[in-house]
Image (cartoon, rainbow, N blue to C red):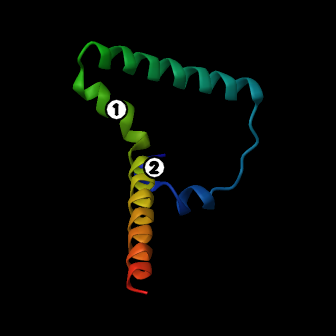
Amino acid sequence: MKATSVGTEFLSQSPKPVNACSSMSAQFQGNAAESNLIRRVNEGDAEAFYELVRPYERAVFLAALSIVNSIRLVLRAAGVLERT
């Protein structure tokens, strides 16, 4: 699944039975792939950096947006309190 399709597409998928061994194997392969990307990033490979962070890009953006919106709400509330 692409990082940009997180949300309704994920929720609409029906659950599939998972074989514990294959699940663990897939998880290990994912970690090995990430380890390889991290090694490449440490060697200065900029494209590897983008490959590593791309799956998390949307989640990080939404978290940052949430923090900024929370700060705006606090500042707006403080402004209201000053006026009263």
Task: Place residue 37 in its image quadrant.
Answer: top left
Disc 2 residue type (three-letter): Ala
- Looking at the image, residue 50 sits to the left or right of residue 33; the answer is left
Question: Which residue position holds label 1?
Answer: 51
Note whether 50 is above or below 44 in the view shown: below
Q: Amino acid at mark 1?
A: Glu
Task: Please identify the quadrant where the C terminus is shown.
Answer: bottom left
Q: Would you say 41 lies left or right of 19 here?
A: left
- Which residue in the protein does label 2 denote? 59
Give the mark nearest the N terminus, 1 or 2: 1
Q: Residue at 30% across / 33% down in the picture?
A: 50
- SS class, disc 1: helix
Position of residue 83 measured from the top left corner of the image (x, y, whole percent): 38, 85
Q: Residue at x 64, y 21 (%)?
A: 25
Left or right for 67, reference 13:
left
Instruction: Classify residue 66 by image quadrant.
Output: bottom left
**Near-viewer residue (21 or 42):** 42
Q: Residue at x 43, y 71 (%)?
A: 73
Closer to the camera in the image, 48 or 75: 75
